[in-house]
Amino acid sequence: MRIFPWLLFSLCATSVYGQIVVTFPPARMVYQRNQAGDTKVYVTGTYIQAVDKIEARLTTRNGEPGSQVGWTEIASPSGNVFSGFLTATGGRYNLEVRGIKNNVQVENTVSVEKVGVGEVFLIVGHSNAAAAESEMVGANSDLVNSIDAMADMNLRNQYLNSGNADDLPPLQPTPLCQTCGIAPMGEYPWFWSRLGDLLVNSLQVPVLFYGAAFGGSNMGSFYKSAYNLPFDHGFIKYSIRMPYTNIRNAMNKYVPRTGIRAVLSGHGVNDLDTTRAGFVFRSEMVMAKSREEANYPKLAWMIATSCYNDGVKAEITAAQNDLIDPSKYNFRGADLNQIDNSGRYDKLHFNADGQVRAAELWRDAIMSETTNLMANAQPLMAQPPTVPGPPLPVTLVSFDGKLLADGRSELEWVTTSETNNDHFEILKSTDAVHFTTIGNIQGVGDSEERSVYSFTDESRDVKVAYYRLKQVDYDGTSSLSKIIAVRAGERKPEDYVFPNPAEHHLEVVTDNGTTVEDVILFDLSGKVVLRKSKSNQIDISSLQKGDYLINIKMNSGQLVSKKIAKR
């Protein structure tokens, strides 16, 4: 089924009819490699013209590591979408994808640059990595990557107020530059850019960092926010489950697509409020929660020996040593206590020399023959991405209805492009669940011009009527629009969401000229379990069976709240 691009008018800008479109991976993607040194490079996309198969290859890049993979059939396409993978070893490549029909290439080859197979790490800690901004540097190697948390400051501010993964930047890696952040939380590169350069030089593969470190935090605040135990802090917002939500969001939003080798933990300096046993307990609970939420009990943590503040606290050092147990996937991290006051501008935070030394110590820990992280840490591998929706034969930019003075309903819809569009069927319902066809309007076939359609429903017998369009191609394939409502009377909250109960999807019904801004689902304890912006269709298939509360905000400012049930 093809889907209309509701409220996403720019979606077709990346698509050219007649060509293949690669929807995943993005440029600069880094896939975590396994212990044998290779991985599955997942590829998804869409196509318009008929093809027998989809082929892909990985070509090496000048001066960069890698071992080329020739043209390989990755998918037998169906429904104008494809999903498959190539197996590749460590390095960085240009990905090329093409369609084949009767052993002949269809249209042009599509390329995605700088697709990497390498190492992915999540940073957890606090601000002792900080230095004066002028003393921080970006990575020298283009193979060092992050998701820049500071690229969109409006989005950044939303995230700091919400803690919601929907307010994080998309999975679009960038070079780790001097002014770049490290999403979800990192504001600066700190010394991780230097570590990235060292690892690229040692491992000869690209590196990707995620950052959950939070200045002023400790393992106590990570533990309490992980388990919803309220605490007060001058600037850490427990109400949005900071700081642990950064681990959760990295694991939920980014890691399923990239995989991860290990978590690099640098806590200890701010945990002087607890005992040796207390630090062990806090750390074990946070590690357990991260493994539970990642659904991967073998998630590796590297634990730094780090508690220097004008001297070392022996009790915390002992606790960090207590945690090291490779059989529990807890590995020895950097011994940052080696950096004394000469490497710290205030006896705590690293100066430029301290940053160089910290990066070297983390490199030494990761590359240690004793730890042998690459052999012993069993990485969490990337999972296949969601198969994209089919390409859009019709760009439907609006669909509205209004009640005429004589009680009839007048519908109008506008398209800006059409491909193989035979006709529209007008569907009507009194309950927004069961629809019947009440009319048929011929399409223009193929067009890149704006086309306006209208239809008048002659019946006048209901206070509220629900309408949707069924767009039908020449070959009989079809797609459905959102549902709109035309009403003569007041509508109740239950009239906005259908079906209820629902098993897989909810649809939000909108009035004439109204669109959905935000949809939030809560469980009955008040925890946010799902959030979607600018969409009338909500996929709830991943939720557990039970009752939920849904809040809907319209662009008109109207708010709708009601209870729904997942079957």
Image: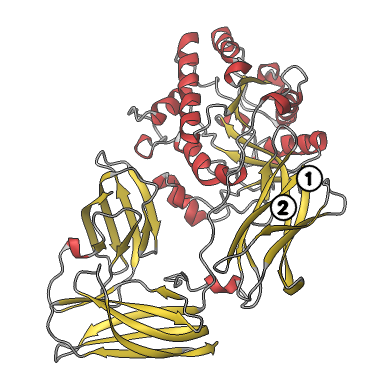
User: Nearest the camera: 364 or 2?
Assistant: 2
User: Nearest the camera: 165 or 354?
Assistant: 165
Q: Secondary structure at mark 1?
A: strand
For residue 278, above or below residue 497: above
For residue 439, above or below residue 244: below
Q: Position of residue 129 (x, y in %)?
A: 62, 31
For residue 187, above or below residue 457: above
Q: Quadrant of residue 318?
A: top right
Q: Residue furthest right?
A: 63
| Residue that badge 1 annotates | 91
Badge number at residue 115: 2
User: Nearest the camera: 42 or 452?
Assistant: 42
Q: Position of residue 501 (x, y in %)?
A: 24, 54
Residue 71 shown left or right of residue 474 in the figure:
right
Residue 405 shown left or right of residue 121 in the figure:
left
Q: Residue furthest front?
A: 102
What's the residue at 56%, 48% (across, down)?
Answer: 149
What's the residue at 38%, 52% (across, down)?
Answer: 531
What's the residue at 47%, 71% (across, down)?
Answer: 2
Looking at the image, can residue 129 be seen?
yes
N-terminal of the pair, mark 2 or mark 1, is: 1
Residue kind at label 2, given as amino acid type: Val
Q: Position of residue 423 (x, y in %)?
A: 42, 86
Badge number at residue 487: none
Mark-to-mark CA distance, 2 and 1: 9 Å
Q: Position of residue 543 (x, y in %)?
A: 36, 46
Residue kind at label 1, given as amino acid type: Gly
